[in-house]
Amino acid sequence: MKILIQISRVIIGVTFIFSGFVKMIDPLGTSYKLQEYLSADVLNIEGLIHYALPLSVFLIFIEFFLGVLLLIGYFPKVTIWGLVLLIGFFLFLTWYSAYYNKVTDCGCFGDAITLSPWQTFYKNVFFLVLILFLLFNIREVKPIGGITLLNWISFLSFLGSFTLMYYVLLHLPIIDFRPYAVGKNIPAQMQYIGDELPPVHDFLLESNEGKDLTTKVLESPKVLLVVMNTITKSRKTGFKNVKIITDKALKEGYLVYALSSSLNETFTSYKQKYDFNFEMLFCDETTLKTIIRANPGIVILNKGTVKGKWNARDIDKINL
C-alpha cells in the first residue's frame, strides 16, 4: 500500500509539474485557450475574457506549484485538497468540451501533446482517482526533508515560475512546439500525411485587392513579416522598432509585409502615423497567434523556412 501511495504521488506530481511547465513557457497560448472556453459559444462568460492572461498565469502557477509541493510532501492536506479542487475544475471543463464538442483541444499540455476531448476527460478521471486515493491515505504523504529544505524548494519554485513566465511574456516562448517554429518549413507543414489534417492548414495571405500572395511569400528567399494579429491591440511602443527594422530590411532587399486580421483601413491609418513603407496582407487571427506569440512580432522566412522569430522589442537581436 505504501509503495502504491508513493507511486501515485510521483505520477501526479511529475505530471502536474510537466503540464504546468509546458504552459509556463507559453502563457499567452494558455490565455488564448482560456478565451476560447470563456467565449459565447462555450461557457458564455465573456466578461472574464479581458482577464484571460492573469487568470492563465494564476492557473499555470497553481498547477505547477501543487505538483512541486506534492513531490516534496510540504503541507500535504492543503496540497491534496488543492489538487482535488483543481482536477475537479479541469474535469468539468473537459467533460463539457467533450460532451458538447465545443473545444477540440483542451491545451492541458500546451502545444507539446495534443489529446482529443474524450482522451483528456478520461485522463482527468484517472488522475482524480489517484488524487482521491492519496486523500484517503494522506498520513502516508511524508516530507522528503527538513523544513529548511522544503522552504528553499518552495521559494525557488515560486520565484523561478514567475520569472520564467515574465521573461517569455516580454520576449517569446523559450521552447516552440508549433509548426511555425524556427527551422520549420511551412510548405512542408502544409502537406497531408496520410489521411490526417496537415499541421499547417490555414496559412493564406491575401492582399487588399483579394489577391492570394501566399505562394509569392513562401517562394521568396528574403522575406520579413511583421505580425500584428489585431492592430488596435498591438503594443504601440513596438511600432517604432518595427519602423527601424523594416526600413533596414527593405534596404537589404527583403520582401516586407505586415500580416494582420484587421481591416486594411485600420492598417492604413497606422501606416501613415508611423511612416511604414510596406503593405498589409490579411491572414486569419488564430493563424497569426499560432505563428508568433507577440503583437507585434517579427518573422523572417527563406523560401518558406522560418529562419527567425522575435518580439518587436528585440530588434537588436535580428541579424539581417
Image: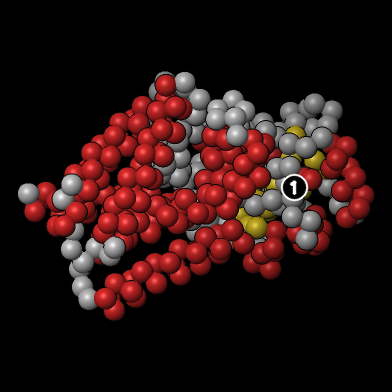
Instruction: Please state if 287 lies on the left or on the right of 238 as rendered.
Output: left
Instruction: Please state if 135 lies on the left or on the right of 225 as rendered.
Output: left
Farthest bottom residue in view: 148
Residue 134 position (above or below residue 141): above
At numbered mark 1, what does the secondary structure look like: helix, strand or loop?
A: helix
Q: Position of residue 98 (x, y in %)?
A: 42, 25
Q: Position of residue 175 (x, y in %)?
A: 47, 55
Q: Nearer the viewer, residue 221 or 181?
A: 181
What residue is rendered at 59% in x and 39% in y? Answer: 35
Farthest right residue in view: 272
* Residue type at numbered disc 1: Lys
What residue is rendered at 84% in x and 42% in y? Answer: 267
Using the rendered view, name the quadrant where residue 308 is placed: bottom right
Using the rendered view, name the quadrant where residue 132 is placed: top left
Q: Position of residue 3 (x, y in %)?
A: 9, 53
Is residue 290 visible to us here?
no
Farthest left residue in view: 1
Q: Nearer the viewer, residue 195 or 161?
A: 161
Q: Which residue is mark 1?
A: 233
What residue is rendered at 86% in x and 52% in y? Answer: 276
